[in-house]
Image: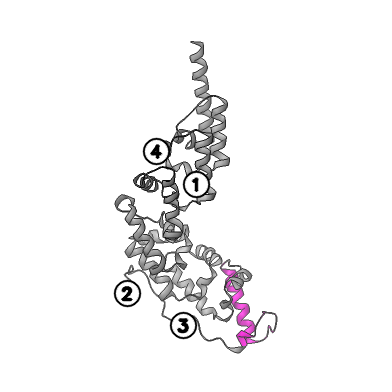
Amino acid sequence: MILHLPQTLIFCPKLSLNPKPSPQFLNCSSPLENPTSDSGLRFRSKLLYLQSLNVNPTKALQLNPNLRSTPIKSFKFIESCLYSFGLERSELGRILDMYPQLLTCEPYTDLYPVLDFLLNDVKIPFPAVRKAVIRCPRLLICDVGMQLRPTLWFLRKIGFVGSNSITWQTTLLLVSNVEGTLMPKLDYLMSLGLKYEEVVNMVLRSPALLTYSVENNLKPKVEYFLDEMNGDLADLKRFPQYFSFSLERKIKRRHQLLCEHCLSLPLSDMLKPSDGEFSAHLVERRLRLFVGRIL
């Protein structure tokens, strides 16, 4: 596969990331087992290297036992490859701590295809690739052919094109499975009585809708909106960002305050203002109501 990458990128020479481990490495279960042996020193060096990246060695070894038999030069090679994505050391340390399997991956078949996909398929400018990866590190462990590209095709099919194209801010949608994750959310919203075109328009206006759990987010908020707020679905179509606000910390509290004072507001006016702005608006509305009654 030929990568069409910026000329500023410098690739490390290819090396085997999974060399056949020596019997000494396989028998080394602890850096304290024989600290004077070469294998013990090499193992301790790997632990210190992982710690220098702020990677938890214990967790990393549990999640990826292959780290024990992988030479430290392979770790450093992976670090250099991730540098080519524009990541800083502190950033890649956090990512490697989340996904230690990256430390034993093959960059030319696992990492660089993701970079090529983001640059040439999604059309994300190179300086924004770093932002995309920081926002959604899971991109680095997804297969391009099996996961990322089919999801991109689906998203473009439903309207993520032109001014609604996927950006570094919405690349997290690409790690979602179409049949298992994205379609159930569209189906749920349509089950409320909304048309397919209306649901798609809501998703394009608020792409985060596709990242929310049906059971833990969409359904409870819809039920509260319809049963407690006596809301109209038209209001959700106008303000799909409703689902991005906390049900307990914001939606219920503000709705209850409005009810206590016999007031009502459009969803956007109710939820978008800060707490201070909402309180001030509430006082102003109450004052107007009071003055109106006197006059």
Give the farthest residue toward the bottom.
23
Please report whichever mark, 4 or 2, sits nearer to the chain's N-terminal start: 2
| Crowd tier of the residue under label 4, counting other residues whose Cα lies within 10 Å: few below 14, some 14–19, many 20 or above | some
Mark nearer the viewer, 3 or 1:
1
Badge 3 is on which residue? 16
Give the farthest residue toward the right.
33
Q: Is residue 50 magenta?
A: yes
Q: Is residue 14 magenta?
A: no
Cα–Cα span, label 3 and label 1: 47 Å
Mark nearer the viewer, 1 or 2:
1
Give the farthest residue toward the top.
295
Cα–Cα span, label 3 and label 4: 55 Å
Please report whichever mark, 1 or 2, sits nearer to the chain's N-terminal start: 2
| Crowd tier of the residue under label 3, counting other residues whose Cα lies within 10 Å: few below 14, some 14–19, many 20 or above | few
> Which circle marks residue 199 in the picture?
none
Pinpoint residue 278: horizontal percent, then vertical percent.
51, 32
Please report whichever mark, 3 or 1, sits nearer to the chain's N-terminal start: 3
- The quarter of the picture where residue 147 lies is bottom left
Q: Which residues are magenta?
A: 24-53
